[in-house]
Image (cartoon, grey):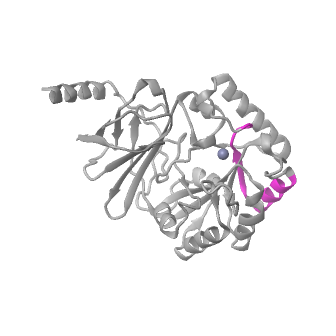
Amino acid sequence: MPKLKFFLSFIVFFISLFPFSFSYATKVIDKIPNNILIYHRFNDSRFPSTNTTIDQFESHIQYLISKNYKFITLTELINNPSYEKKTIAITVDDAYQSFYDYAYPILKKNNISATLFLSTSTVGSSEHLNWEQLKDLQSYGIDIQNHTHTHPHLPDLSIEKIEEEIIISQKIISDNLGFTPHLFAYPYGEASEDAILVIKKYFKAAFGQHSGAFSLNDPYYIARFPINENFGSIERIKNASSVLSFKNTGIEPSNQKLNVISNQKRYVVNFFEDPSNVTCYISDFNGSIKSQQNIMNTVILIELERPPVKGRLRFNCTKFEEGTYWYGYQYYVN
Ligand SMILES: [Zn+2]
């Protein structure tokens, strides 16, 4: 009896979520991967969770070249998301000096471009690039885009403060580099409904830092595969570059910002197609979270065995079928 009650309440919850509203264009070609990698620091062993050694980076580039990936910038990807060739986008956040010293020469040597997300308040400080170096990158063809002014946790800010971050940083980039960015990356990959409201006003698309195949299903929260010393093996690059996206996906609750006191244990992932071979792994700061997963038509109803703790809560749903399909999402629990 309790089980039936649980299931009925789940159905009521589920029905209350409709209608989903997905008005965005989806990728035309499904079987061709167009994924995104994200890097931060290079050859800086003080920070293994955000660092990549230069040997690793060189091996990643050589692997991707050997597999005939076409390297593109995010501007190219967003302007033309239905590439008929498999592509990879290298992205680098925070504009550290180490990018210029170690990774940029490797990109130049191989005639490869990349996208750099810049927080304007740090420009010229001891560990970050200055405007002369940024101009040099720009003239080479590095796609420079916006990563706020002060790199805050956006879900903690008011709409007014978020907008202030964007207006200031857009102006500083425009004054110094002569163009206005049209793409945005959330600091720490942390978004919220409020942040997205603002970001939509100023940008064409925005990126998180959670694993997942590239897709325009959610153009203001696009996945990128984080790469670092611990997740920097060739096996990781092989998976990250080759995974495919589900045709459509959506998750409820859709607001990335969750209150820790809400004890949110129920989630609904909609695949808009039969998800019977899909498995979702959920994890937070304390490790993986066991869950009960029930399929109903095109959705998976997920009930966590414990509520998430403060910090980032990640969903990774995969399916193995003539390739690996990977949907990822990140919540910010506070
Ligand atoms: Zn950052």
Q: Report the number of discs.
A: 0
Relative to 261, 178 lies left or right = right
- Which residue appears at 65% of the width and 66% of the height? 53
Relative to 298, 117 lies left or right = right
Residue 300 in which image quadrant = top left
Q: From the top left corner, tell me how far across and down residue 190 is, in percent.
A: 57, 38
Q: Is residue 149 magenta?
A: yes
Is any part of residue 24 visible from this angle? yes
- Nearer the observer, 131 or 282: 282
Relative to 140, 20 lies left or right = left
- Which residue appears at 25% of the width and 49% of the height? 276
Quadrant including the N terminus: top left
**Residue at the extreme bottom of the image, as rendered:** 66
Q: Is residue 216 above or below residue 77?
A: above
Give the image quadrant in which the ligand numbered 1 is located.
top right
Residue 265 in which image quadrant = top left
**Residue at the extreme right of the image, as rendered:** 132
Q: From the top left corner, tell me how far across and down residue 102 is, in percent.
A: 74, 66
Query: Which span of residues is magenta-colored?
Result: 132-150
Q: Is residue 127 above or below residue 203?
A: below
Q: Is residue 314 magenta?
A: no
Is any part of residue 299 visible from this angle? no
- Which residue appears at 44% of the width and 32% of the height? 254
- Nearer the observer, 128 or 64: 128
Q: Is residue 271 above or below residue 83?
A: above
Q: Is residue 200 above or below residue 55?
A: above
- Nearer the observer, 87 or 64: 64
Q: From the top left corner, tell me how far across and down residue 34 is, in percent.
A: 51, 59
